[in-house]
Image: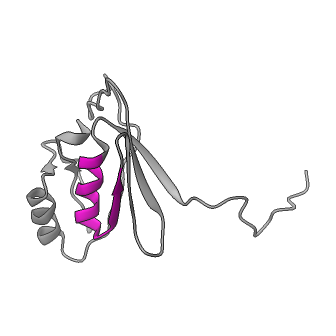
């Protein structure tokens, strides 16, 4: 098979969609954390930066959240965020309603990250 698309993207990824019980609450949380404009309707909400990829939140009836780290209902995705000051960012996320997960995996030497859980809108 000849690779006729070498060096060319087949598609673009303008949006990541996340299922949840309360799209508006989750969009407001991420909108505040990322300083994004958000749009909310009855069953959907989205947040977008001025120049990049958007996150959408879709209402799912009878949504059941993951139970990570157990595998009863394993996590299906996670979002990695970059921050300048980990301690300040952690405090700000907690102030927005997020919580520090009680199970913090061992970090590789020199890494700086913490596992946060979104507000109850995601649970």
Residue 90, horizontal then vertical, whole percent = 14, 63
Quadrant occupied by the C terminus? top left
Instruction: Write down the quadrant of residue 9 in the picture.
Output: bottom right
x 8%, y 60%: residue: 95
In the image, taking residue 44 as reference, residue 11 lies left or right, namely right
x 22%, y 52%: residue: 115
Residue 116, horizontal then vertical, whole percent = 20, 51
Is 120 above or below relative to 56?
above
Q: Nearer the viewer, residue 23 or 103?
A: 23
Residue 21, horizontal then vertical, whole percent = 29, 35
Residue 36, horizontal then vertical, whole percent = 32, 68
x 18%, y 69%: residue: 86
Q: Main secondary structure of the magenta part?
A: helix
Q: Which residues are magenta?
A: 24-40
In the image, taking residue 37 as reference, residue 105 lies left or right, namely left
In the image, taking residue 6 as reference, residue 83 lies left or right, namely left
Q: Is residue 81 magenta?
A: no
């Amino acid at each position: 098979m000849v690779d006729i698309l070498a060096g060319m993207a087949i598609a673009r990824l303008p949006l990541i969609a996340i299922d949840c019980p309360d799209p508006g609450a989750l969009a407001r949380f991420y909108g505040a954390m990322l300083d994004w404009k958000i749009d909310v309707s009855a069953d959907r909400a989205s947040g977008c930066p001025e120049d990049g990829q958007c996150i959408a939140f879709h209402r799912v009836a009878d949504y059941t959240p993951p139970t990570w780290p157990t595998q009863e209902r394993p996590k299906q995705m996670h979002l990695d965020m970059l921050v300048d000051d980990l301690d300040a960012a952690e405090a700000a996320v907690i102030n927005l309603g997020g919580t520090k997960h009680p199970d913090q995996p061992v970090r590789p030497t020199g890494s700086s990250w913490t596992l946060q859980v979104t507000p109850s809108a995601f649970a």
